[in-house]
Each structure stands twice: as C-alpha cells, then as structure tokens.
Image (cartoon, rainbow, N blue to C red):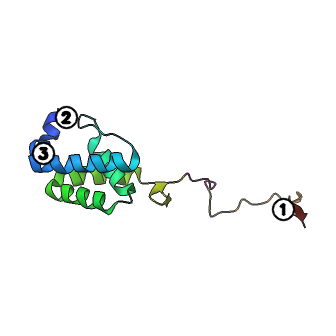
Amino acid sequence: MNTLASERGWLLDPNLLKLVHQCRRLIQSEFGVKLHLTEQHLEEQLANYASKSRSSHLAKTWETLTEKVPQLKARTEEQVDEDAPRRMYRGQAIADDRPANSGKEEPQSSGGPTKKKQVIYRGQVIG
C-alpha cells in the first residue's frame, strides 16, 4: 500500500518544493484558492489550475515542475484525460446544455401538427 508520504517523496527536494510553492502562490493570487501540501489530490489540483490559468508564468512553472518529476506528469495526464470536459470557454468548462442526440433530429410523428417557434424581435412577435 502506497502512503501519501511515499508518493510525494519528490517534495523533499528544496528546488522542487520551491516550484510547488510558487505554483500555489500564483494559484492563490489568480483564483483565490489556497492549496495545502497535505491535500490528497494536490497534483491533480495544481495541474487543473495550471491548465485553466491565463498566467503564462504559472503554466511555465508547472511545466518546469513536471519536467523534473516525470511520475507527476504521467499521473496528472491520466487524471486530466478522464475528466476532460467536452467544451471549454476561456479556460473554464461550460455545461453542455445540448440534448444527448445533438446531431440527430427526432422524427416527427406522422399526422401530428408541428409546433412553430414564436420569434420575438424588439418586443414584437414576428411571423
């Protein structure tokens, strides 16, 4: 059984710890979220915020950290692939409000009246 301490042995390196603290500070200043070193999914959260960030400095710092810790990159890529949202807007996931059969139209029942959509333009009903 892997413990949290054995998985995060790389945090004992002062240079790597400095990069993690730098990422945490940048995340706190941009998103207002304070991440703690003892959190269970710290790596995934750091990767998530680094991908959402508009700050190129945070992205470069995270990239430097993942280059120095290859196990970190592999673990976060697996998590990001599983949770990857389909649609993004300005780095934020947006809800998919389209119906499940987004490309397919449901067939109309034969003989039933079709309902026409009401169009309103500048407060006036058109057509």
Q: Amino acid at mark 3?
A: Trp
Left or right of 93 on screen, residue 75: left
Where residue 30 sits: x, y (%)? 38, 51
**Magenta-drawn stretch contains 1:** no
Residue that badge 2 annotates: 4
Where residue 64 sits: x, y (%)? 19, 59
Q: Amino acid at mark 1?
A: Ile
Sequence-wise first label, 2 or 1 = 2
Q: Please report the residue visible at 88 percent of the width from the left and 57 percent of the height from the top.
A: 112
Residue that badge 3 annotates: 10
| Camera sees residue 120 | yes
Which residues make up the magenta segment?
95-100
Where residue 72 sits: x, y (%)? 21, 50
Is residue 124 positioned above or below 39 on the image? Answer: below
Residue that badge 1 annotates: 120
State which mark lies toward you, 2 or 1.
1
Q: Amino acid at mark 2?
A: Leu
Q: Secondary structure at mark 2?
A: helix
